[in-house]
Image (cartoon, helix red, strand yellow):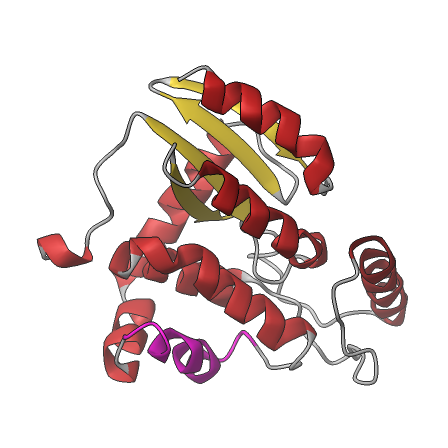
Amino acid sequence: MSAETTTAPPVERELIYVADPMCSWCWGFSPVIARVAERIRGHAALRVLPGGLRTDTQMPLSAFEVDDIMHHWQEVARHSGQPFDFSRPLTTDYVYNTEASCRALSVMIRLRPLCGLDYLHSLQQAFYVGRRDLKDPEVLADYAQTFGLARTEFIDRWQSRQAVEALGEDISFVRRCGIEGYPSVLLRSGPRLQRLNIGYQPYDVLEPHLIRWIAAS
């Protein structure tokens, strides 16, 4: 792997955002993390990692699961104000597996480290508003193109053994940090990690903690 396609070297201070492209609360959190990213600009780096919410799921949804998920999405929409296309609900033949989209995010943060958050947002919008299938590599490549990646380059990388292993490394790091819910934000100062949140929180709740963290630099 060339130097141009590796992740950036470690920095002294960074905010680590852990999310899954097909996590509804992560979509609800999207405007919040955008404000957080703007608030830390010039003070700390931003690193995005895939959470791996449902990477092992193989079975189609049951009728109960469809109802439960759609109810969950409505709750997210009410709390966050984020748009959802409820005219096209999930169906019982849908396999809700997030491995493909998480692997795509893992590829993006290595090929375009500064584009991770924007790529994540584009996938979330594609799934929840556009109702596109994020298990389809062609769909994942559609959005990768907007960040200057050729379709063939992206798909070749996404299909590689290295990409599968890299996603495993990302998820292992997340698990070692004790994160089992999304969205989650970690604040790193040198070797020290602290949690800002696990689960959805409005920006006004997070801002005072961010201000103190920034001031401590």
- 183 shown above or below 107: above
State whether the magenta stretch is mostly helix, strand or loop. Answer: helix
- 122 shown above or below 41: below
Residue name at image x 30 percent, y 82 percent? 151
How far across and down, in percent of the image, does residue 179 sit?
Answer: 58, 33
How far across and down, in percent of the image, does residue 176 sit?
Answer: 48, 28
Q: Is residue 25 magenta?
A: no
Where's the N terminus, which quadrant? Answer: bottom left
Residue lying at the far left in this picture: please name it. 2
How far across and down, in percent of the image, does residue 31 sit?
Answer: 64, 55
Where's the C terminus, which quadrant? Answer: top left
- 42 shown above or below 150: above
- 54 shown above or below 173: below
Position of 191 with respect to 99 (left or right) is: left
Q: Is residue 1 visible?
A: no
Position of 171 with respect to 152 (left or right) is: right
Q: Nearer the viewer, residue 141 or 121?
A: 121
Tell me which corner region of the image, top left, top right, bottom left or bottom right, holds residue 185.
top right
Q: Is residue 192 visible?
A: yes
Q: Nearer the viewer, residue 133 or 80?
A: 80
Residue name at image x 62 percent, y 61 percent? 57
Position of 152 with respect to 64 (left or right) is: left
Residue name at image x 24 percent, y 48 percent? 7
Segment tinted magenta in the rendering: 134-148
How far across and down, in percent of the image, does residue 34 sit?
Answer: 55, 52
Position of 24 with respect to 107 (left or right) is: right
Total numbered circles: 0
Residue name at image x 84 percent, y 53 percent? 79
Q: Nearer the viewer, residue 128 or 179?
A: 128
